[in-house]
Image: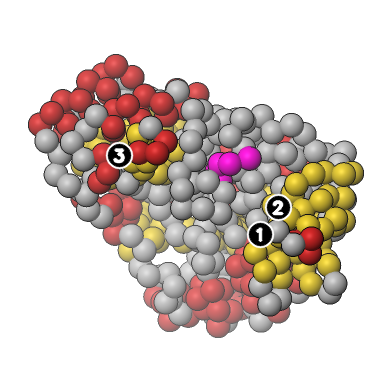
Amino acid sequence: MADSDHLVLDIESLDSDGQGIAHHQGKVVFVEGALAGETVRVRIVRRKPTFDKARVEAVLRPSSQRVQPPCPHFDVCGGCALQHLDVAAQVAVKQRTLEDALAHIGKVRALQILPAIHGPSAGYRHRARLSVRLVVKKGGVLVGFHEKASSYVADMQQCLILPPHVSALLVPLRSLIGGLSRPDRMPQIEVAVGDRATVLCLRHLEALTDDDRSQLRAFGARHGVDWWLQPRGPETAHPLDPARADVLAYALPAWGLRMGFRPTDFTQVNPYINQVLVTRALALLEARADDRVMDLFCGLGNFSLPLATTAQSVLGVEGSATLVARARDAAAQHGLQGKARFGAQNLFEVDAAWFRAQGHFDRLLVDPPREGALAVARALCELEPAERPQRIVYVSCNPATLARDAGILHHVGGWVLRAAGIINMFPHTAHVESVAVFDRS
């Protein structure tokens, strides 16, 4: 490799993917494995017209926040990006990412920075998608996350961020899948851990044999897990044992709730943080006993049902009719059907007329996917001042789209960004979740 492919760089900051940012001869270089403030020797692995990609070969001057990665697979596995950075420093980096996005994209600053929400940094990931590959050259089936920046599956014997009992299944799963009829046609296993059960949902592209099913049952009995099977899309997922269809649930004990879900439903991956997040979001919303509240992108009712225990009424709206049906069932199971209503609506296409048709709401909670809530923000700004909710709490999994929507709410609609802060839902990754509060001016 030419000498020009080996450089010594000073790392200026981290990007949104946890890569170091440096400059060389007027060009940006993104460096995997580097931390802000370090001097590193790197190898260029990809050249683009406007930037280069590089990997660290040696750390010549380490950051004071650099730590030994706790997982032996960190250098290869793409499941984590920041294990070499102290956990407290990870939180600070994510807070800076949020503030920078709000300032540069939304051109807005929060009046108050909220204390970060954080919790356990290991064993927290109760939802995961494990890839499965038959790799003859490596001795058989591999089960785990993809390698960094690769479609290959990492050769993993354990995983720091999975619950210990799920991490312990990685090697046994190799043997199990390898002994089934078509291990080359089973591309993934969806992991879903509830408070009383663990489900593994096997995606299979060919029909299973009776022997396959017998082996799965024996494995489940031996390791205390339930199997689901998914022959095609998520809607085809079904339990291997129909009597065990409703074993998955997570608790929200502060409100006396236990939320049932299916392994293909969306739920937060980190149940420890989710309980704190729901508490924080409801406290920030300040819904009173006579308030009508709307919860957009409500999913299973993660916020709606706790809100229904305090507010006058809650309308939860979600794009998935399947999740809406689950939310209605949960409301009925908890005796909240009189206070919590749910409806299906494509929230990427709503307008002011749609909001008016729902009636006036005093408070609004929004928890969109990574695409954000652009149509919602624009529609809210088109409402007359008296029609608008007094307060909006926006839970985000993407600082860039939160910042875009915050800019619209503030500069077009006149809402004040009262407060914002990060939620470290995914320790050791660069993923940034956050919560923001807007008040009607």
Residue 76: in magenta span: yes
Q: Name the residue under label 2.
A: 55
Confirm or deny contact between disc 2 and disc 1 (CB under 8 A). Answer: yes
Give the extent of the magenta segment: 75-79
In the depicted structure, whether residue 356 falls above or below residue 66: below
Q: Which of 349 and 433 is in front in this view?
A: 433
Secondary structure found at label 3: strand
Q: Mark 1 points at which residue?
A: 45
Q: Residues within 10 Å of mark 2 (few under 14, many from 20)?
A: many
**Residue 263, quarter of picture:** top left
Q: Nearer the viewer, residue 347 or 210?
A: 210
Give the residue at x 84% y 74%.
26
**Residue placed farthest to the top in the image?**
222
In the depicted structure, whether residue 236 falls above or below residue 320: above
Q: Left of 436 or right of it: where is 322?
A: left
**Residue 173, quarter of picture:** top left
**Residue 244, quarter of picture:** top left
Whole-percent x, y for residue 153 in the image: 45, 44
Give the residue type that dot 2 points to.
Arg
**Residue placed farthest to the left in the image?**
210
Residue 389: in magenta span: no
Q: Which tag is nearer the camera, tag 1 or tag 3?
A: 1
Give the residue at x 79% y 64%.
4
Confirm or deny contact between disc 2 and disc 3 (CB under 8 A). Answer: no
Q: Name the residue under label 3.
A: 201
Q: Which tag is nearer the camera, tag 2 or tag 3?
A: 2
Dominant SS in magenta: loop
> How far apart in space, not on screen, are marks 2 and 3 (Cα)?
35 Å
Give the residue type that dot 3 points to.
Cys
Look at the image and tell me in which quarter the C terminus lies.
Answer: bottom right
In the depicted structure, whether residue 46 falls above or below residue 124: below
Q: Left of 43 or right of it: where is 145?
A: left
